[in-house]
Amino acid sequence: MSRRKRDLFVRTLVFLFALNTVCIFIYFSLHPRPRRPLDEENRTITLTPPSLPSTALKPWPFLPSYLPWNITTFPPLGSCEAYFGNGFSRSISPLRGRTGFFRCHYSQTLESSICEGGTIRMDARRILMSRGGEDLEKVMGRNEEDELPKYEVGAFQIEGEGWERREDRRLVDQAFLDQYLRHGAVHMHTMRSLVESIRVVPSGELQCDQVIDDPTLLVTRFEYANMFHTVTDWYSAYVSSRVTGLAGRPHLVFVDGHCKAQLEETWKALFTSVRYAKDFTGTVCFRHVILSPLGYETALFKGLTESFACQGSAAKMLRQKPDHQKTARLSEFGDMLLSAFDLLPIPKPRPSELNILFVRREDYLAHPRHNGKVESRLSNEIEVFDSVNTWAKLHNNFKCKLNVVNGLFAHMHMKEQLKAIRDASIVVGAHGAGLTHLVSAQPGTIVLEIIASMYKRPHFQLISGWKGLEYHAINLPGSYARPAEVTDALSKIVMNLGC
């Protein structure tokens, strides 16, 4: 080919490319991308003003311990899956329609419900509570009652057909609340109060200042600065997302007035976004809202007062041979926490190294009613920790290297805390909320809990069992632990591990 022909060929290609680009631009200008269709129950909804652009939800990650959440086959009453997984087998729909819908999924085992609805309006001005999200130092001394929501009538509204002539516009009556949203042992059941406040308005009368298209969880936190109770809230929110079959991780709205806390970073990592109810100015309508049960209603909390036998097992084994007395759900949730901070996949441990994580308790300012001093569970904790350090150095040999990790969790980023528990071969510590991290411990991890006489509670023995972890305890006559007793227990553990 001559040079002249080659130049002509190149110019022709450039011209055709430019022409094609212009044509594509004109086509999409004249044919805008259609809006994402609404689900079947909401397809005819008309809301003003136009809804905000939909944002992509965070996808569900691959979880090594994941088991399918089958919404058509439900587990037997009182089984492990009924306690920890999809036991919400009874669906009750007090409102069905082309515009709005509301239904609750009730678990007879847990005696609680996960509720969801569409075309629901929230008016935060009718929710009496503090603003929430403030810096802790600015709200010191604030009462907890000021931070928990109290709902005025109509704080939440929902569209319904055929309600025009009804005098009683309540979505549900007292009998519904008593059966599916029971008070139980909770003095102030905020989810029950929220549903009780919902009023039904005729179709076309729901006016919204803004609309949230994507699924949104509404959560009210109790004891929000405590690790154990926050884990129960995280677990409840995770299960609610799975039971309602969400394709991605939802947005989350705190319907409480708590100030910022260290554990808030994990909420943000787990879900697509986090906001406080009082952040919204005016009214906001949700196309799909999910009401997460209180953390007190999860199996993690109920296990403290109810007797049920569940042993942790590998998900792979349960896929091959289901067992109603075994569960992998807590491991699945632990993997979810790790994944939220990019700590999956699990690195292969070095067989010649053992990480001994010593979970510590230290002073820190937790909430507006806290003086910054934590309650001592082990009066000579520093002495015991120093002894474990010295013992580990003396025990190191050609077979194994023992690494003692100082678990000062109160001043560690959540990712560092989770990495420490993930990489631990042995977890040792006094009874305290920091041991709740055991939900993310890996198979084969061994637990040694030091229990003072005033704190003989089964929290972490239960979690260890539900995870399938080997558990040991040193029960003290008071709060003082003899360092030699702790190091002797560790010596037996590492000896059994071949070190």
Image (cartoon, helix red, strand yellow):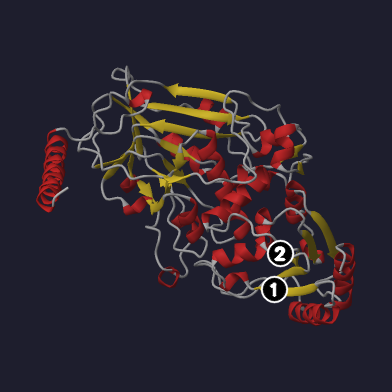
Q: Amino acid at mark 1?
A: Val
Residue 335 higher or lower than 477, as above or below? above
For the residue pair 54 and 182, the one nearer the viewer reads as 54
Q: Earlier in the sequence, mark 2 or mark 1?
A: 1
Q: Would you say 383 lies left or right of 488 here? A: left
**Residue at the spot 31% in from the left edge and 24% down from the top edge:** 43
Q: Would you say 104 lies left or right of 486 here? A: left
**Residue 340, how many percent across, how many down?**
52, 54
Specify whether residue 433 is in view. Answer: no
Q: Amino acid at mark 2?
A: Ala
For the residue pair 185 and 296, the one nearer the viewer reads as 296
**Residue at the spot 85% in from the left edge and 78% down from the top edge:** 395
Label ID, residue 145: none
- The image quadrant of residue 448 is bottom right
For the residue pair 107 and 439, the one nearer the viewer reads as 439
**Residue at the spot 78% in from the left edge and 73% down from the top edge:** 402
The number of callouts visible is 2
Residue neighbourhood size for the residue with mark 2, other residues' Cα within 10 Å, grouped as few (<14), some (14–19), many (≥20): many
Q: Please name the residue that numbered disc 2 is placed on.
A: 424
Label ID, residue 405: 1
